[in-house]
Image: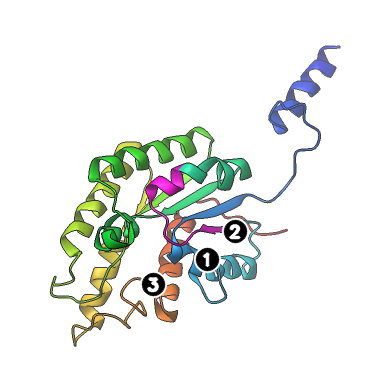
Amino acid sequence: MKLLQYCCIVLLSFIGCSSDKNIEQHPPRIIFFGDSITELGDKPSGYVSIVRDSLKSLGMQYEVIGSGISGNKVTDLQQRLKRDVLSKHPAVVVIYIGINDVWHYQFASRGLSGTPKDQFKNILTDIVEDIQSSGAQVILCTPSVIGEKIDATNPWDALLDEYSDISRNVARERHIVLLDLRKEFLAYLSANNPTNAEKDILTYDGVHLNERGNRFVAEKMFGMLEGLGLFFPQK
């Protein structure tokens, strides 16, 4: 009898003590959660697709999901967090947000608005906490660029730096992995934009990634994911 009870306890531990016999079994999931940069990244040659294809080529048993929606800000991520992320029970969630929270201040005439800094921090913190509570690991990215000039004359450089600092602080306070894309982009552009071009280095319009930009971001993403030590080869 004791042996039977022990076996039941072990079995329950493997199925999460759930009585639902219809729970879908799937490989561990990595969800990329963001705006149009992530939405486009899930298309062929996009950074999400590159990560997915790279893992597959290496025999890694992960399901990679792109969950980006054009125009999204941190408020939008919070509204769809349960539906698009938590309900899928991911192992890792990569949050790449902040561009529209800054950029949309420019489009007040269209009825759009940026996100106040205190609200950005509070909501981003809540999102991270909810994901952590689900048991998933979080990688938080700083927003990258709105314009690729290297002389600090892009109109939104100063504010983008402030929002990047907020993301850095949230990552530190919540003890999660930070992928500092803002820092990585600025370093790359400093070395590879000798004519101080506004676009066409890593982006095609100053914001959205071109082919080189997608490869660049995929490389940085893959490095962070690999650093978590979660990858395992398919047997």
Callout 2 crowding tier (Cα within 10 Å): few <14, some 14–19, many ≥20? many
Look at label 2 and name its amino acid: Val
Task: Specify whether residue 175 is in view.
Answer: no
Q: Are marks 2 and 1 in contact (CB under 8 Å)?
A: yes
Disc assigned to residue 48: 1
Q: What residue appears at the point 77 percent right and 19 percent down from the top-left corner?
A: 6
Spot the residue most to the bottom. Answer: 195
Between the residue at mark 2 and the residue at mark 1, the CA separation in whole angstroms equals 8 Å
226 lies left or right of 53: left
Disc assigned to residue 25: none
Q: Quadrant of residue 202?
A: bottom left
Q: What residue appears at the point 69 percent right and 59 percent down from the top-left corner?
A: 234
Q: Which residues are magenta?
A: 65-78
Task: Specify whether residue 94 is in view.
Answer: yes
Disc assigned to residue 64: 2
Between the residue at mark 3 and the residue at mark 2, the CA separation in whole angstroms equals 21 Å
Residue sitting nearer the eye, 230 or 76: 76
Residue 36 position, x and y percent, is: 45, 64
Between the residue at mark 3 and the residue at mark 1, the CA separation in whole angstroms equals 14 Å
Look at label 3 and name its amino acid: His
